[in-house]
Amino acid sequence: MIEIRNVTKAFGGTRAVSDCSISLDGLAISGLIGPNGSGKTTLFNLITGLLKPDSGEIRFLGNRIDGRLPHEMAALGLIRTFQLSRVFPRMTVLDNMLLAPQDQTGESFLSLWTRLPRIRKEESENRERAVELLDLLGLTRLHDQFAENLSYGQQKLLELGRALMAKPKMILLDEPTAGINPTLIRTMIEMILAMRERGQTFFIIEHNMDVVIEVCEKVFVLDHGEKIAEGRPEEIQKDPRVIEAYLGL
Amino acid sequence: MDLLLHLCVVIAIYAIFALSLNVEVGYTGLFNFGHVAFFGIGAYTSALLTLAGIPFIWSLPAALFMAGLCGFLLSIPALKLQGDYFGIATLGFGEILRMIVNNEVWLTKGPMGLPGIPRPELFGIVFDSLPRYLVLSSGFALLTFSILAFVVLSPFGRALKAVRDDETAAEILGKNAYRFKIKSFAIGSVFAGLAGVLWAHYTTFIGPGDFTLTETILVLLIVVMGGKGTFLGPVAGAVVLIVFQESVRFLRLPPEWTRLLGPLQQMIFGLLLVVLMVFRPEGIIREKGAKR
């Protein structure tokens, strides 16, 4: 689905991502791990258009996407979440969810005056879906609160819910379980697995190896911007290069 | 009685002006420090056209179109800038416009201003008396309020709020932030133009002195005090600030005090703002969804 070929990105003299090639073809949930500063988030930024690669190419469903603008990615079916959650703080939880669906007729100023019935219909469909997802995420009770009033873990769940509302073909999750309590980690994992059953694909940056082993089919390991290993999570754990990168032995 | 009617007319006009700015500041997070420019463009366009004999029913849409067009054209380059830099660009535009009005004497009569602007006539009714003008201006205020409330509560308004809260996150969700900001700015400009038109035909005299930075600050105060990002806030702010501003003018003070009136008014404004920001920074009206 996502095809990364020989991508390099340098900041000044540091190569954050170096000649990296990753193929996510046929994988429902793939993981991306590596020590801090190994270039994982940079790679996500490259895929989602927040950064432009210096060289190499990135394809999504066969189309070249590197160098495109971030807002075009969502239309192609690629949505991400952030390491530090980025919900819309002064919007209600429900509005955060309702914002995400793509191609909303009501987002065109002209259509507001000419296609009101259609807008109403879309809104009520989206609302139904949002209510269902909020229920799965355990956020129903908070639907009319500003997102800034949610706990950090709840915000991360909301961000996942928001990504799902966009009905993307692929969701990139940047450390979905970092800094949140075990109960919410459980909710997060259940949600990801439930959505996989519905055919959703994910690409996940994760430090928590238990989570990686539980959800990922295949893992890619980055170190100093280079891909040093890939394989099934159980194999990866035993790989000497990975152990060396993590423990610095 | 006349004083009360006058007060209501001014409140209605400033409510429109503040509602238009609220779309930009409150809902889109665009701090526009040159908003008075679009008020001025509306006022001058309609004034010049009616003085040239064109009926109000045509000068009004022409003025709104001019204000909207100028807003649209300004926003294309200005919105390439972020945050403070955008604010400074709009501030500059406001000043440039005032200079043009001051210096292009062939068009605007410069500092002499435009006297004798005719009272508006719509559908055979001339709005020449205070009560009639109040009906006209509050009718337009109500219309502005309804239109803008409808817009900000729509999915379009929701996208504006998202851009205000976190532009990058909005982009990641497929919203073209730049375009939404341009639209918001143009909409705000159109309604600022409407307020300007009503102002010009109410006072029947306009000059460059009516469109200074002070006006922008006043309308920003109205929005922030009233509660930005709420649709009743600018109306509440307009009532409070205009009543205060206009009533100080009519206080029965001993004659030797009258020269202190202007500075006194400014001081009380400042004090009011400080008190409000300390005790209720979100303004008179609070946004829905805040802490229970």
Image (cartoon, rainbow, N blue to C red):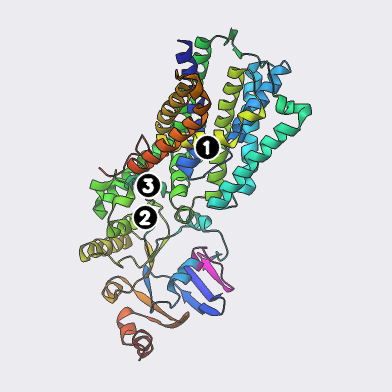
Viewer-side label of 2, 3:
3
**Residue A113: x percent and y percent?**
50, 31
Viewer-side label of 1, 3:
1
**Residue A116: x percent and y percent?**
45, 32
Q: Is residue A54 above or below residue B66?
A: below
Magenta stretch bounds: A46-62
Which residue is identified by label 1? B217
Near-viewer residue (B255 or B130): B255
Instruction: Look at the numbered disc 2 and give the secondary structure of its residue.
Output: helix
Task: Say which residue appears at 52% left-offset and 58% top-offset.
Answer: A70
Chain of the residue under label 1: B
Neighbor class of circle 2 (other Cα within 10 Å; few <14, some 14-19, many 20+) is: many
Neighbor class of circle 1 (other Cα within 10 Å; few <14, some 14-19, many 20+) is: some
In the image, taking residue A239 as reference, residue A60 lies left or right, namely: right
Numbered mark located on residue A90 in the image: 3
In the image, taking residue A147 as reference, residue A56 lies left or right, namely: right
**Residue B279: x percent and y percent?**
33, 41
Q: Tell me how far mark 2 sits from mark 1, CA to CA.
A: 43 Å
Neighbor class of circle 3 (other Cα within 10 Å; few <14, some 14-19, many 20+) is: many
Residue lying at the far left of the rendered structure? A183
On the same chain, marks 2 and 3? The answer is yes
Chain of the residue under label 2: A
Q: Amino acid at mark 1?
A: Ile
Viewer-side label of 2, 1:
1
Which residue is identified by label 2? A164
